[in-house]
Amino acid sequence: MSGMNSWIAVVLYIVLAPIIGGLIAGVDRKISARMQGRFGPPLLQPFYDVFKLMSKENIVVNKHQKFYVLCFLIFVIITGCIFFSGGDLLLAIFALTLGSVFLIIAAYSTYSPYAYIGAEREMLQMMAYEPMVILTIVGMYMVTKSFNVVDIFTYNQPLIYTLPGIFLGFLFILTIKFRKSPFDISMSHHAHQEIVRGVITEFSGKELAYVEIAHWYENVFLLGMVFLFFATNWAIGAAFAVVTYLLEIFIDNNNSRLKWQFALGSAWIVALILGVGNIAVLALK
Amino acid sequence: MNTVLFLIVYPVIVALLLLILPQLAIRKFIVVASTAILTAASIYLTATYFNTGAVFFEFGTEALNVGIFAIELVLAATIIIISIKHKQFLAALLMLIGAAMTIWFEQTYGEEIHVANNLFVDNLSLIMTLIIGIVGSLIALFSLGYMEEYHHHHHDMKNRTPFFFFIVYVFLGAMYGVVFANNLMWLLFCWEITTFCSFFLIGYSRDEIATKNAFQALKMNLFGGLGFSAAIILLFMNAHTVELNQLSGLASAVVLLPAALLAFAGITKSAQMPFCSWLLGAMVAPTPVSALLHSSTMVKAGVYLIIRLSPIFAFVQGGATVGLFVAMVGAVTFVLTSFMAISQTDAKRVLAYSTIANLGLIVVCAGIGTYELVWAAIMLVIFHAIAKSLLFLSVGTVEHNLGDRVIESMDGLIVKMPKVAVGMVIGIAGMFLAPFGMLISKWAALEGLVAANPILTVFVAFGSAATLFFWTKWLGKLIMIKEKPADFHPHVPGSQSFTLTCLAIMTVGVCLLFPLISKYSLEPFIASIYGHAYMLDQSNVAILLIMMALVLVLPLRLLSYENLNYKPQYLAGTNLSEKEKFYGSLGLTRDLSMRSFYLASIFGEDKLFKLGVVSSIILILIMIGVGM
């Protein structure tokens, strides 16, 4: 996509991603509730929540946390903009890393024990999924000879044929990225008591709304990554993105949270076996 | 030409002056003036030659070579005597072997050696010149205030500050020699002088640990020096040349073994596995020494040499295999030292591990030696030199104010010492975050590696993940907002805050200017060797610059917050009216305090270090074996 098209993509992403992301969150809550034998909130509940949060009073421990959370949101949006404008995949990941680091230091800046433990665990999660993310991009480059999303997107064959191992490895770390059980160790939507709400313990009102919106943007970006594996066919790609998310909901509801040692160990072993294995096969070809 | 000589000779003259004039006022004057002069001369040299391509100078007379030979012998004798005095017989033996090799070589072939060009300047040496001239002399300036405070904090130690400055300036002269030398014998001479400077500075405090670590560094570097000497002798015996610029044109059979041996010397100097323990031990030296020798300049001499060899790895038949094993040593070092950095609590040790890791990444790039990777390697050298010296010097400043340099003590530094903390935040961001420097070069490294050897990206992927962890947790400590203790009054001397400010500005500045640095300096240099140059894609550069602008502008938002309702943090309902205290068990009032993860059971040194030593020794043996 060049010039005009990529600008249109950026605008569409900025406008539509939170709507899609919010709807996904609504569906998520609905399905989760049904799995647990509850009726669940209305589909649009995530939007009601965010609007309500936006109107709340500004309660903070210090003003720096507000600033860091704002940066978190901005850089998550930039990540998606780079991705959906067809830009460099590595650069998109670097922007996402920068955003995530802002969220972590927002938690640190509050000097709160629960936010602190959440921040430390959030870093563990990043360390757990980062190698697989890089290997995914490396794999995509090896097949398409480009880091640009636009070239990967227009490649003449679905990447899943040549990158099955990498796809499975990526699915594995998506559970961490979507903050689903058993890997929701740094923060949780549920009332896990030992870390209160982890990273987001000290955020309220507008900050919390920003965090929520950032997650919507991030989730749309991540599903875009899933889509890339099937990009030759829109319908199949979109279907796989949906199936992937349903799978994550299923995993979320059928697992209890595990220790960080397991998150780190399993994610790295998966990256080493599926990710490196796939790359080795490609390199030998 | 005259500027080149000036840059080598002037620091040595300054060194002698500082040794014979120990008065504080005179020292201050000389150091301040020399900072200005060396900076100006380095910039002048760059301005003169950045556009000319490589320029060679014949310079050199029989008398000069005899003089160098004489100095070598005197230094060798001195080192042997000192070693024997401290019962360090291995060090003495290594020095003796080195000296014997030099004497034998001079006696046997001295008459035959004819060097066309002893000195040269090209864009890579200019980049090194700027690092030595600007960063190096700024660190010397920093030392003015630092060494005063250092002796204030260690009163029982003998004050040998004039000797300290003498060695620092001799070192600067020798470093210039390293980067300008085309005659490998001169290069080795300067190389060994930097080894001796490092030895004296590590042992500065003369206590037991310092002496032990100084000898460890000496032994490992002398061992590397033996490889260097052997490479020169082999080169001359088989190819009748000792000139650096001739190497990549030589036949594969003649050049591979010398190249492997030179790479080996570079690996010891850059403290790669299995030799990285000397650099960790070197952290006992005063902090400016760590900043100058052990992060921004001397250890860079090792990777500088390997970068010089990369055309051999890229073009000479069979060179790629040697280069691959060089790169593997770097890759293993990068991953394992990044892991071990996680388990370190001492700030300087974290910096040391991170330095070794980044040098490892440079070795990976230079070992493979494609044009993209050489670009990445040189960019890494530039960014790392600035950001890491900023971090070292900041840690030194903090240590004098907090009383220790443990990361856990740096809780809320942004409140206690805001300016120094902002500098450290910039330095840390510069080490691992987009849109800052190291990340730009890591990105280029990834791009280059995936095209050349995808398996090596696995090392980068895992190492970078660990890097993310240990930097972020340090960053988090610094930016915590907590109450400032009433009795805390930091003191930062002017020379220190000036240096820190300059380095912080430079860290951000090189990130903004890197497209220009690439265009005017790196691209012509790389094109002259490889025929085509490398630069990140223009649109990506634009996005990086936009991100940089955002990072610089966004903090303004902090000034405009109003109507905030401040509440203390959530402490499960046990908050007290006093801030940062809580109502603990048994009704005691307790202070709020938090400790980070160090994950010693996974990333501890004991197992990983052994793994690294064993695997890297095997790799080095194969590397030299392949060279044969």
Image: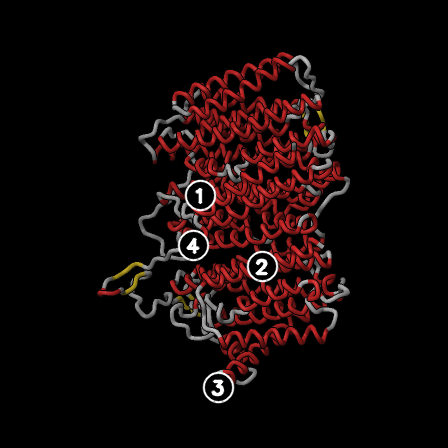
Question: Does dot 4 land on a helix, a strand or a loop?
Answer: loop
Earlier along the polypeptide chain: callout 4 or callout 1? 1
Give how far apart the Cα atoms at labels 2 and 3 are. Answer: 38 Å
Q: Secondary structure at mark 3?
A: loop
In screen coordinates, is B27 left or right of B543?
left
- Neighbourhood count class around disc 2 (C-alpha, 10 Å): few under 14, some 14–19, many 20 upward: some
Mark 3 and mark 4, same subunit?
no
Mark 4 belongs to which subunit? Answer: B
Horizontal and vertical percent for residue A100? Answer: 53, 61
Chain of the residue under the numbered disc 2 shown in the image: A
Q: Secondary structure at mark 2?
A: helix
Q: Position of residue A153 (x, y in %)?
A: 72, 65
The chosen color scheme is: secondary structure
Instruction: List the residue tagged with mark 1.
Output: B349
**Dot 2 corresponds to which residue?**
A273
Task: Please identify the residue farthest to the bottom as the structure is shown.
Answer: A39
Specify the quadrant that holds the C terminus of chain B.
Answer: top right
How far apart, in angstroms, are the residues tagged by discs 2 and 4? 23 Å
Residues at discs 2 and 3 in contact (Cβ within 8 Å): no
> Which residue corresponds to mark 3?
A37
Disc 3/disc 1 C-alpha distance (Å): 54 Å
- Asked whether the residues under the numbered discs 3 and 4 touch, taking CB atoms below 8 Å apart as contact, a structural biologist would say no
In the image, residue A68 above or below residue B232: below
